[in-house]
Amino acid sequence: MAYIVWKDSFNIGVKEMDEQHRLFVGYVNELYDAIQSGNAEAIVTPILDKLTDYIQLHFAAEENIMKSINYPMLETQKAQHVYFVSELTFLKSSFLDKSQTAHNMFLFLKDWFIHHITTEDLKYAQIINKIDTESAEFD
């Protein structure tokens, strides 16, 4: 059973980012399934590593898009990304040394993801979609 069920409301209208957000949800759900199956030690560490690596690539791609449109809130987004990576790293090490529960880790991942894409990412997506609409009008 999926921990995060993808909803159309998660789409921000930027194809590349929507696809990456879906992958992120897939990794979170893969992690959830691994923990639910009781194979925490053997499976969870590589999935957490994959999730951590992936999110850093995603944030870099997202920040490049924001740079390309001179997004005025780029520095705010970067700070949020740094926070997420540091929190994920902390939760990962805390989970692995048994001082953090899986439940807390999943709450953070789900809450942050849903809030971030439906508020922060939507802001830059609206600018991109406006630019795309305006450039289509001149074609």
Image: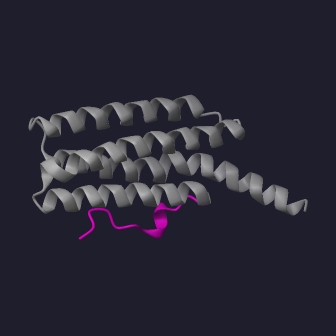
Q: Position of residue 120 (x, y in %)?
A: 50, 45
- Residue ID at (9%, 58%): 38
User: As displayed, is residue 97 above or below residue 20?
Assistant: above
Outermost residue to the front: 42
Quarter of the image for residue 136 reads bottom right
Left or right: residue 50 versus residue 39 is right
Q: Does the magenta stretch include residue 56?
A: no
- Residue ID at (64%, 43%): 65
> Which of the image's four quarters has the C terminus?
bottom right
**Main SS, magenta residues:** loop
Q: Position of residue 62 (x, y in %)?
A: 57, 43
Closer to the camera, 104 or 26? 26
Closer to the camera, 26 or 116? 26
Q: Does the magenta stretch include residue 11?
A: yes
- Residue ID at (9%, 35%): 99
Q: Position of residue 75 (x, y in %)?
A: 56, 28
Left or right: residue 112 versus residue 117 is left
Q: Where is residue 87 in the image (x, y as percent from the top left)?
A: 30, 34
What's drawn in magenta, residue-wise? 1-13
